[in-house]
Amino acid sequence: MVMFEAPDANIQTGLMALTRLNLTNFRCYDFARLEVDSRPIVLTGPNGAGKTNVLEAVSFLAPGRGLRAARLGEVGRRYGAQHSASETCGPRAWAVAAQLAWDDATVDIGTGLEPTTDETRRERRIIKIDGETGKSQKDLGLLTSALWLTPQMDRLFLEGASGRRRFVDRLILGLHPDHGGPVSAYDHSMRSRNKLLKEGCRDGDWLDSVEDSMARYGIAVAARRLETVDSLQELAAGDDGPFPGAELEMQGRLESWLDDMSALDAEDRFREALSAQRKSDRGLGATSIGPHRSDLLVHHRKNGEKASQCSTGEQKALLIRIILAAAQLQTRERGRPPLLLLDEIAAHLDAKRRAALFDIICSLRIQAWMTGTDNSMFQALGERAQFFDISAARIEKISVTHKAFYNSI
Amino acid sequence: MATGDIDLLIQLMSKLPGLGPRSARRAALHLIKNREQLLKPLATAMASASQSVKQCSACGNLDTVDPCVICTDARRDSSIICVVEEVADLWALERTAVFKGRYHILGGVLSPLDGIGPEDLSIGGLLNRAGRDAISEVILATSATVDGKATAHYITDRLSECNVTVTALAHGIPVGGELDYLDDGTLSAALRERRKS
Ligand SMILES: [Zn+2]
């Protein structure tokens, strides 16, 4: 069995690729424009030249806060020290616009921070689809989705569970663009309960109503995570390729209830547990049960080790395996692959794994955006990809017939 | 740029919802340029409203009489109360002309994170009305936000001791969508298809 089969010739998967990207006042770019086709994109150049910023810009075309989880106000272009006085006049407006090829059609999408002179209004993200202002980030999510892997995620298995929960939620967002709703509704309700407990609220009906929200949204979140991780597990388990098979499990109290009973019964159980733990949670200053305590457990299937015990290289390989499984799952469920943003991806991979990764990306017809300091790392892609050089916030296309380029690989 | 009265006018106008400093300057200038047709009648209307408008002691509606015309209208069904967050929601429902009962205005929603509790809303008044008057049904028309839904849940709990049927607007109200922004068709459908909560 082949780990990643090329899409069945009879079932033509849809296309999702950017064909044009415009950045305005985005990070180090005052203005940049990039014309591309649907092949994978390789951006190379020295550190600090602005490669990751391009990936971040693409990530803002999907719902969420982008691959740096940045606040909107941080993203606008900053000027040198001589202009620092002008920075006090609030966050700078910025924009990312793109043309998206969606099967045979194209859609113009854009997002950014709205220019505003009204200091009383909170910073607001605007979304435009074919010139019309979109209502919410979900509108973007119906058109685009993006998965990414950055050097910061190298420690995903070593650090706290919150990073792994966010990771799972991001994978779910690619499958269900509305997943952000229940996640933030749960968080809102939980913070409300914590505050009521802290203030010594004695109104049982009030706590009941807040805990009822927590139960409904919390079980919805837990059920989606369980379902998605189960599907990913099916796709990531095989041990037949260059990337190790991964054993995935979503672990937590709610998850174990959902294994044993219906979602409605689990909601009741969660409601009862919250009600019973008011006193101890008040002492704790936190809510001791809920989807905010769950964790994604990952094991290396072949040697049975926990991912956190594996070598740095194997951890990266496991992570790639999971991301590729998620891309495959999205292709299956939504009929088209996500955009894939791979920052400094070649760092921990040997030539064999690099070549295998490129083959999988091409066979799934993913428009991957990859960065690296060194062209030669992407040699195996050849003409299957398009190459750009970035230095000092200037992006230039490298022609594959260019002599210097061939010399460099 | 300007002094005295003009400056004060701009300053006050800029506090109106939807108006920033720039649009406040434009609006003020427009009023001043149309002194007879606009500025003077507006000043009179404002002075008069500030004298006459009061809050209905029964339902919380704003009117020039107390109780308000809705509460005293004998053609309206006094056994049904529709609970809304703000007067703007009442106006939105009245525009549809589908609802023929009476209202209760909460004055907001429960929001622990903003420090708004049951005491800050007119929930006590609602319980009094439901317990005292011959009320058969209470329709909860709070918004579909997390806090709006939790508020509806809370009121349902509190009303459980009164002998009333509690219903909620049917689906079709988008999350975070305030009643005032819904079109009349959606609103009347949500009202017709209300269900027991
Ligand atoms: Zn009234």
Image: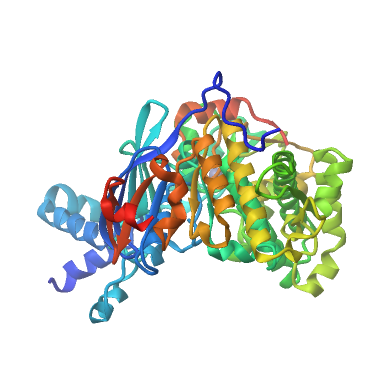
* Left or right of residue A329, residue B133 in this image: right
Q: Residue at x 69, y 63 (%)?
A: A157
Say whether residue B132 is visible.
Answer: no
Percent across and percent down for residue A405 are 31, 54
Q: Quadrant of residue A252?
A: bottom right
Residue B69 against residue A188 in the figure, above or below: above
Percent across and percent down for residue A356 are 57, 45
Residue A72 against residue A87 in the figure, above or below: above
Instruction: Report the number of discs.
Output: 0
Percent across and percent down for residue A294 are 76, 57
- Most extreme residue toward the front is A407
Q: Residue at x 70, y 43 (%)?
A: A236
Which residue occupies the foreground of this view, A287 or B112?
A287
* Left or right of residue B189, residue A97 in this image: left
- Most extreme residue toward the top is A10
Which residue occupies the foreground of this view, B12 or A259?
A259
